[in-house]
Amino acid sequence: MLSHILVTGGAGYIGSHTCLELLNAGYRVSVVDNLSNSKFESLNRVHKLSSADQKIDFFECDILDEQKMTEIFQQQKPDAVIHFAGLKAVGESVEIPLDYYQNNIAGTITLLRIMKTCNVKNFVFSSSATVYGDPASVPILENFPTSVNNPYGRSKLYIEEICADIFKSDDSWNMAMLRYFNPVGAHKSGEIGEDPNGIPNNLLPYISQVAIGKREKLSVFGNDYPTSDGTGVRDYIHVVDLAIGHIKALEKLSQNPGLVTYNLGTGKGYSVLEMLHAFEKACGHKIAYQIVDRRAGDIAECYADPSFAKKEINWQATHDLEQMMRDAWNWQSKNPDGYN
Ligand code: NAD
Ligand code: UDP
C-alpha cells in the first residue's frame, strides 16, 4: 500500500483538487510547489474542506533545485510522487520554448533522478491528450499514434518517452502516464477552483470571466470545422473526476503494473457553442460572443475512448456537463478575483 504521496505542483488547479481527494482517502500528503502559477491559499482551503486530521506538509521549492529537493525526499520519505508541476500554456510555449523545456523536461529529469537515488519508484505523470495531435479518428484510444506540434506538447511526449526508457532500464519502476482531456469545473463547495493569471487561454475560464463581467465577450475560434455546429469539439472532464483518477492510478501502482498509460476523459465531446449555452444555463444570463478566425494549431475534434481506464483501474467520470458548469460558476461567482 502506498500511503505517503509527494505531490509536485500541488497548489495548482488540478493539484489542489487531487490533494483534497488524497487527504479524504486517508493518504499522507506532502506538496512541493514554487507558487509560480498558484497561491498557497488554495492549500489552506483544501485543509478547511478536508475531513482528515492530517495537514499537508508544504515546501515552497522549485523542482529544478536538486539540493533542496533531495533534502525534502530524504526528510519526507514518500512512497510515490504525483507530478503536476509544469508550465502549461501552448501559445506561450511557442514564444519561450527554452523555458518550457527547462521547466518541464529538465525539471522532470531532476525529479526522476532524485527519486531513483532515494529509491522512490512509483510515479504518476500529468500528461495530456495533446500528445495525440490531430487524431485520424475519434474517440481516441491509448494506442493511437502520437504527434505534437508545439513545445508544450513536445515536453509532455518527451517526458512520456523518457519514462519508457527508464522503465526499460529498470523494471522495478511503476509509472502511470495519465493523458488528461480538458479539465473544467471546481470543487462543489466553490472554495477551490481554477485561478488563471492574466487573460485565460482556455475556453471555460474565459467564458466564466465574461459571465462575471471581467471580459466583454468570448471569441469563438472558428465556426467552419467539420463538426455539428462548425465549432471545435473537446472532451471536458470535471476536475474532481480527474482528481479521483489519480487515486485509482495510485491503487494500480501499488500492484506493481510497470508502465501504464490511461486516457482520463468522459468519452463525450461538446462544441464551443454547446459549452457556452450550457454555461448560460448555469449562470442564468446570456454570454456575449463573436465568431473569429480559427486559432493556429487547433484541431476540429478531440475526445477520449475512456474504456481502458474503466477496465484497468475501475475509473470513469461521473459528473455531467450541467455539474461541470454549475461548479465552475459557483467557484467564479464566489471568488470573482480567484484566490486574491
Ligand atoms: P497549474 O499551473 O494550476 O498547476 C501547476 C503547478 O505547478 C502550479 O502550482 C505551479 O506553481 C507549479 N509549478 C510549475 N513549475 C514548477 C516548478 N518548476 N517547480 C515547482 N512547482 C512548479 O496547472 P494545472 O492545470 O493544475 O495542471 C497541472 C498539470 O497537468 C500540468 O503539468 C499540466 O501540463 C497538466 N495538464 C493540464 C491540463 C489543463 O487543461 N489544465 C490538461 C492536460 C495536462
Ligand atoms: N476556444 C475558443 N475561444 C477561446 C478559447 C478556446 O473558441 O477563447 C475553443 C478552442 O478553439 C477549442 C476549445 O475552445 O476548440 C477548447 O480550447 P482550450 O484552449 O480550452 O483547450 P484545447 O484547445 O487545449 O483543447
Image: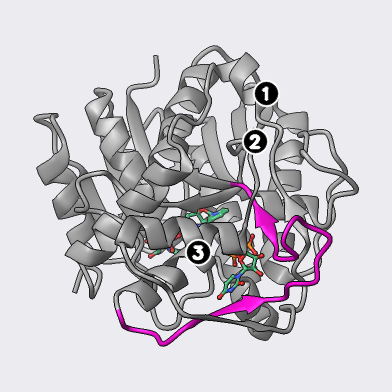
Residue 60: in sight, yes or no? no
**Residue 216 lies in the magenta-colored region:** yes
Residue at image mark 3: 276
- Horizontally, residue 157 falls left or right of residue 190, namely right
Label 1–label 3 contact, CB within 8 A: no
Residue drawn at point x = 53 percent, y = 68 percent:
202
- Horizontally, residue 145 falls left or right of residue 169, namely right
The quadrant the N terminus occupies is: top left
Label 3–label 2 contact, CB within 8 A: no
Depth order, front residue of 141/107 = 141
Q: Secondary structure at mark 1?
A: helix
Label 2–label 1 contact, CB within 8 A: yes
**Residue type at tag 3:** Leu
Q: Is residue 210 above or below residue 174?
A: below
Depth order, front residue of 264/125 = 264
**Residue type at tag 1:** Ser
